[in-house]
């Protein structure tokens, strides 16, 4: 592995990273601006306290503290939606591992070079994992700029950590999309199946929130959204092991996609 | 030309499966391509040429059989093999938003000698009159083909595997391509090219394999394949062809496909010329023109013969 494909992937995809990071970062900055208003913060508390717990669960809030503290406001207003929106980004990078180049017929030239298939796919996975980290970095930087501009009192460590919980989710979707792409080979099929995986995860989590005393709550633990919303960080119940497990699962999917890619014909 | 096989396939077979449908793309292909030769791989569309090439490059895996390049197994030693191979696919697809230079630089980086390879790519591009500063999406199909040739040859590989290399090239560039292939051969390097353009194969190849419906039909030297069993003869008479001569030509043995047009006649002559010369001695012959059959005619005759045998 000489890193040429990593470098090339970084060079040709950095703009996409900046656009996504910038877009998401601005959203974070906007939420900090909202959170900086003591009037808004003061009005949220009584409003949320008046809602029944089941209603709060439906909108993804299991504890009123999520809206009554600045870091909670940033987390619930930004991190949850960031995960949903960055799922789209994760699918696009997952498609770039093999599916796009295969469907475009470019892989024929790439694989005629003195490199193994494992090297091609592994270097791309590494490059896109780094680029995703770039998006997350921008998602962190912009809210922090907001904190500085609006002079908001906030637990910066918690804000950073809650945003970082999204990263394993991106890696997981990238791994899943990469695996689906190496099996399905077709771009549209891959997009469809990956979107199905994301929507299913989202609704499992949503239903688990809405019916916290039922089987749906147990099932919720199988949704990656359950672990990537930053809420546990704000409520001090964050277990780093969950993020590590997500990264391990993402690595397993990535490993399976390498294995599948090695075993099959190209471009049929 | 050496006799060391550079490419060696043994009973190579490929069956494509789509649902319950099985398509036999290649059946028991056993072939040797020797060092220092330009080997033509001829066949109509869908004959199995591209399938063979894709298997040699380990892009697809054979259902049965094996193949070696440089004495190395194509599956277990693909990296070693690919170091010494230049490949031009039949349908060349590249990154549309990159310039020729960017693509050359990237591929050279993967190969490991950026300076040397890009210099050589520029030399090839100059020779093919290709502007490497343009983006791929702005290239015509001919220029894309030239870029593909530059990519295939830029690292000075020991073996070139070219799938329909001249499709889209203008006649002048085809000539340049032919020269380049001959120079390549002169260096002791090997070229394996697939084509359905028979004239191209006839011009540059040392040996030709003919494939049809996934089966190898023949492997012959160009000399042997073009060893003519018949000639086309065109005779121009000063006066209108007498009807007695017309009848005589039509009824003669070893003559067929007689076409008459006023004062001229064109016919296919098998065997010796003497009976024809005696037959036309009644008329005043102004001009007599003898043509060897083209490889295409031999190729079609080859297929027709096969068809007749099988029916």
Image: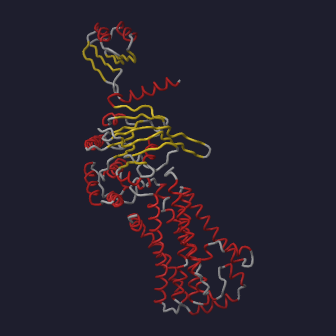
Quadrant in which the N terminus of chain B is drawn: top left
For residue A182, side relative to residue A123 (left or right): right
Total numbered circles = 0
Q: Residue B253: name its quadrant.
A: top left
Q: Is residue B32 above or below residue A146?
A: above
Residue B294 percent coordinates (x, y): 35, 28
Q: Residue at x 49, y 54 (%)?
A: A103
Q: Residue A130: name its quadrant.
A: bottom left
Q: Is residue B220 above or below residue A238?
A: above
Q: Is residue B297 above or below residue A156?
A: above
Question: Is B263 in front, or is B176?
Answer: B176
**Residue at the right extreme, as displayed:** A214
Residue A164 percent coordinates (x, y): 52, 79
Q: Residue at x 38, y 53 (%)?
A: B80
For residue A75, side relative to residue B223 (left or right): right
Q: Is residue A76 visible?
A: no
Residue A168 percent coordinates (x, y): 54, 74
The way the protein has been coloured in the rendering is: secondary structure
Q: Residue B17: name its quadrant.
A: top right
Q: Is residue A243 visible?
A: yes
Residue B233 percent coordinates (x, y): 32, 19
Q: Is residue A117 above or below residue A48?
A: above
């Amino acid at each position: 592995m000489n890193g040429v494909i990593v470098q090339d992937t970084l060079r040709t995809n950095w703009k996409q990273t900046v656009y996504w990071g910038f877009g998401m970062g601005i959203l974070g900055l906007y939420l900090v601006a909202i959170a900086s208003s003591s009037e808004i913060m003061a009005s949220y508390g009584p409003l949320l306290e008046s809602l029944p717990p089941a209603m709060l669960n439906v909108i993804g809030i299991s504890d009123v503290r999520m809206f009554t503290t600045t870091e909670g406001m940033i987390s619930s207003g930004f991190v949850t939606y960031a995960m949903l929106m960055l799922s789209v980004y994760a699918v696009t990078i997952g498609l770039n591992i093999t599916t796009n180049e295969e469907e475009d017929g470019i892989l024929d030239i790439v694989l005629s070079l003195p490199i193994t298939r494992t090297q091609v796919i592994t270097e791309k996975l590494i490059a896109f994992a780094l680029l995703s980290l770039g998006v997350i970095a921008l998602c962190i930087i912009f809210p922090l700029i907001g904190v500085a501009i609006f002079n908001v009192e906030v637990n910066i460590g918690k804000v950073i950590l809650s945003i970082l919980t999204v990263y394993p989710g991106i890696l997981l979707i990238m791994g899943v999309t990469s695996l689906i792409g190496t099996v399905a080979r077709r771009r549209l099929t891959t997009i469809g199946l990956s979107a199905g995986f994301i929507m299913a995860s989202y609704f499992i989590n949503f239903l688990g929130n809405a019916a916290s005393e039922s089987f749906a709550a147990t099932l919720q633990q199988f949704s990656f959204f359950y672990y990537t919303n930053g809420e546990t960080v704000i409520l001090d119940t964050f277990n780093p092991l969950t993020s590590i497990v997500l990264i391990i699962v993402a690595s397993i999917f990535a490993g399976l996609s390498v294995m599948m890619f090695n075993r099959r014909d190209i471009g049929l | 030309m050496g006799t060391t096989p550079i490419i060696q396939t043994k009973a190579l077979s490929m069956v494509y499966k789509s649902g319950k449908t099985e398509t036999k793309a290649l059946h028991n292909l056993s072939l040797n391509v020797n060092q220092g030769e330009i080997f033509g791989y001829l066949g109509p569309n869908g004959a199995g040429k591209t399938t063979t090439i894709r298997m040699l490059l380990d892009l697809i895996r054979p259902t049965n059989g094996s193949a070696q390049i440089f004495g190395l197994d194509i599956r277990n030693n693909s990296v070693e093999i690919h170091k010494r191979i230049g490949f031009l696919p039949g349908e060349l697809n590249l990154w549309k938003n990159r310039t020729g230079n960017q693509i050359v630089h990237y591929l050279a980086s993967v190969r490991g000698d950026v300076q040397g390879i890009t210099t050589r790519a520029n030399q090839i591009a100059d020779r093919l009159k290709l502007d490497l500063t343009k983006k791929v999406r702005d290239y015509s199909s001919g220029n894309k083909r030239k870029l593909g040739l530059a990519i295939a040859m830029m690292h000075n590989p020991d073996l070139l595997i070219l799938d329909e290399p001249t499709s889209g090239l203008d006649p002048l560039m085809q000539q340049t391509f032919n020269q380049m292939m001959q120079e390549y051969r002169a260096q002791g390097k090997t070229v394996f090219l697939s084509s359905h353009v028979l004239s191209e194969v006839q011009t540059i190849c040392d040996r030709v394999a003919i494939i049809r419906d996934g089966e190898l039909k023949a492997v012959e030297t160009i000399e042997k394949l073009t060893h003519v069993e018949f000639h086309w003869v065109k005779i121009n008479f000063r006066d209108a062809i007498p009807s007695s001569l017309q009848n005589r030509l039509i009824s003669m043995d070893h003559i067929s496909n007689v076409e008459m047009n006023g004062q001229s006649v064109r016919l296919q002559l098998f065997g010796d010329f003497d009976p024809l010369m005696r037959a036309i001695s009644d008329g005043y012959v102004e001009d007599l023109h003898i043509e060897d059959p083209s490889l295409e005619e031999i190729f079609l005759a080859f297929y027709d013969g096969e068809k007749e045998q099988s029916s």
